[in-house]
């Protein structure tokens, strides 16, 4: 999942990454608004304090890896952790 604020200095870069990610992999990366009720809870759960941050979790919710801040990782790095 990717935590970011759409209307921010990193919003455009994240939107482009998400567009390219879906185009290249056919997969969707779940988006989390850190200012929403659910987003605040997820930020606390996964200790996200920097935006954008991509967090890969397993089926039980355990963090496998994360990529905080810019620059964003390569699409191939992230797609490995995302189900179709």
Image (spheres, helix red, strand yellow):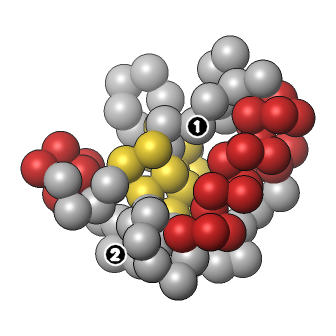
Q: Residues within 10 Å of mark 2 (few under 14, many from 20)?
A: few
Answer whether labels 1 and 2 touch (C-beta < 8 Å).
Answer: no
Q: Is residue 5 above or below residue 22?
A: below
Res. 66 in view:
no
Q: Residue at x 32, y 55 (%)?
A: 33
Res. 38 in view:
yes
The mark total stands at 2
Q: Is residue 9 above or below residue 63?
A: below
Q: Most extreme residue toward the top, as rendered?
A: 84
| Nearest the eye: 54 or 13 | 13
Q: Most extreme residue toward the bottom, as rendered?
A: 9
- Secondary structure under tag 2 reads loop
Residue 51 x %, y % = 45, 73
- Secondary structure under tag 1 reads loop
Marks 1 and 2: which is nearer the front?
A: 1
| Quarter occupied by the C terminus | top right
The residue beneath circle 2 is 49
Residue 3 x %, y % = 43, 57
- On screen, residue 49 versus residue 3, left or right, reads left
Residue 5 x %, y % = 40, 67
Q: Residue at x 72, y 76 (%)?
A: 71
Q: Residues within 10 Å of mark 1 (few under 14, many from 20)?
A: many
- On screen, residue 12 versus residue 5, left or right, reads right
Q: Residue at x 62, y 30 (%)?
A: 28
- On screen, residue 69 versus residue 27, left or right, reads left
Q: Is residue 49 above or below residue 59?
A: below
Q: Closer to the N terminus: mark 1 or mark 2?
A: 1
Q: CA distance from mark 1 to mark 2?
A: 19 Å
Give the quadrant of residue 46: bottom left
- On screen, residue 37 versus residue 1, left or right, reads left
The residue beneath circle 1 is 29
């Amino acid at each position: 999942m990717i935590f970011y604020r759409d209307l921010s200095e990193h919003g455009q870069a994240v939107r482009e990454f998400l567009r390219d990610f879906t185009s290249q992999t056919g997969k969707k990366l779940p988006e989390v608004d850190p200012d929403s009720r659910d987003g605040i809870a997820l930020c606390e759960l996964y200790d996200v304090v920097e935006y954008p941050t991509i967090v890969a979790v397993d089926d039980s919710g355990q963090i496998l890896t994360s990529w905080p801040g810019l620059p964003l990782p390569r699409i191939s790095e992230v797609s490995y952790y995302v189900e179709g």
